[in-house]
């Protein structure tokens, strides 16, 4: 058994026109310390997969197992970072992270230890210079850094990221991607991230999971990214292997856009040879 198993998950929602099957037989094993990206067209069920792993939705069939324990509700072992940072506007940067730390570690850490742990996680995302600022006093990229620090401070077994950089400008996005790579190399986090950005997926991932179009979406292909770490985006821009991987993802997305979803098993490739339209569940606010 893998660290995290998404075991033949299907989910069907009731609608006015009858049952709507959003996901069909999604099967994925994720190893500890692995960075997996989910990519696909809008409405392909990426956020639904993430919300099932987070415990925000229950699968109609199949389920999720994390470290041999079934996932059936939200928990701090699966922290979620959304595109919207969801910081509490009346609290400082420090207090937004400290609130999450107090909720998770109040019984296991002293007050001094919780203070040090809060500061440590803000240092990880290079926000220790703005501890006393409030969300309306910092930039969008800085808010997302605080959101990531808050999630990391919970010491989750799996970090779930739903388009975390989608609302940022291009320059800020590249800085955030580099920061995430740096953090993941230090902490060896297990990460599942939704993205619409092909370059982001190839740069950050160990594997890219490409979803077929909905309804009844499933995994179409899995692409293994065999690029050494640490990764330098400038060097990779001219790297033929990187560009091959990028072309494979673009080809898949183009084919899925042009023709109906094929009902076939996922293709696994291991060598170089907007918001989803599904129903939106209640969001988990990790700091509340």
Image (tube, rainbow, N blue to C red):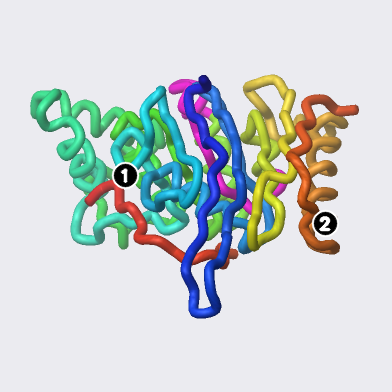
Element type where label 2 sits in the image = helix
Which residue sits at x=45%, y=47%? 52
Residues under labels 2 and 1: Cα distance?
Answer: 35 Å
Q: Quadrant of residue 101?
A: top left
The answer, for residue 212, to whether it is visible in the render is yes
Q: Nearer the viewer, residue 157 or 214?
A: 214
Marks 2 and 1 close (CB-CB < 8 Å)? no
**Above or below, comparing residue 189 to residue 39 in the picture:** above
For this view, does 15 lie left or right of residue 96?
right
Counting residues from the start of the chain, the first of labels 2 and 1 encountered is 1
For this view, does 243 lie left or right of residue 19?
right
For mark 1, does the 10 Å Cα neighbourhood hold few (<14), some (14 to 19), or many (20 or more) residues? some
Which residue sits at x=45%, y=64%? 280
Which residue sits at x=57%, y=59%? 22
For this view, does 90 lie left or right of residue 111?
right
Where residue 217 appears, x then y in whole percent? Answer: 65, 54
Q: Quadrant of residue 255?
A: bottom right
Element type where label 1 sits in the image = loop
For this view, does 252 lie left or right of residue 172?
right
> Is 155 part of what is drawn in magenta?
no
Q: Quadrant of residue 31?
A: top right
The residue indicated by pointer 2 is 254
Residue 160's disc is none
2 or 1: mark nearer the eye: 1
The residue indicated by pointer 1 is 74
Extent of the magenta region? 182-199
Where residue 259 appears, x then y in whole percent? Answer: 84, 62
Which residue sits at x=29%, y=39%? 75
Where residue 194 appears, x then y in whole percent? Answer: 56, 48
The answer, for residue 197, to whether it is visible in the render is no
Where residue 229 appears, x then y in whole percent? Answer: 65, 21
């Amino acid at each position: 058994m893998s660290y995290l198993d998404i075991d033949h998950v299907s989910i069907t929602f009731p609608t006015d026109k009858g049952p709507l099957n959003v996901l069909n037989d999604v099967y994925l094993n994720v190893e500890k310390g692995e960075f997996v990206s989910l990519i696909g067209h809008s409405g392909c069920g990426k956020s639904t997969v993430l919300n099932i792993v987070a415990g925000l939705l229950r699968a109609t069939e199949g389920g999720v197992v994390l470290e041999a324990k079934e996932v059936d509700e939200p928990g701090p072992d699966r922290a979620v970072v959304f595109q919207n940072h969801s910081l509490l506007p009346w609290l400082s940067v420090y207090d937004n992270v400290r609130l999450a730390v107090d909720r998770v570690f109040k019984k296991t850490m002293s007050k001094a230890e919780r203070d040090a742990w809060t500061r440590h996680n803000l240092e990880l995302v290079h926000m220790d210079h703005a501890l006393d600022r409030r969300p309306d006093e910092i930039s969008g990229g800085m808010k997302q850094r605080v959101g990531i620090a808050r999630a990391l401070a919970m010491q989750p077994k799996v970090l779930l990221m739903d388009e975390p950089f989608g609302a940022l400008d291009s320059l800020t996005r590249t800085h955030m991607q580099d920061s995430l790579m740096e953090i993941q190399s230090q902490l060896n986090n297990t990460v599942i991230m939704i993205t619409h950005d092909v370059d982001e997926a190839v740069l950050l991932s160990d594997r890219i999971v490409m979803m077929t179009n909905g309804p009844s979406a499933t995994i179409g292909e899995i692409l293994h990214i065999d690029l050494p770490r640490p990764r330098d985006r400038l060097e990779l821009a001219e790297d033929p292997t990187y560009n091959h991987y990028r072309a494979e993802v673009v080809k898949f997305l183009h084919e899925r856009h042009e023709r109906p979803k094929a009902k076939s098993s996922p293709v696994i490739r291991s060598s170089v040879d907007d918001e989803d339209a599904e129903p939106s569940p209640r969001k988990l606010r990790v700091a509340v």
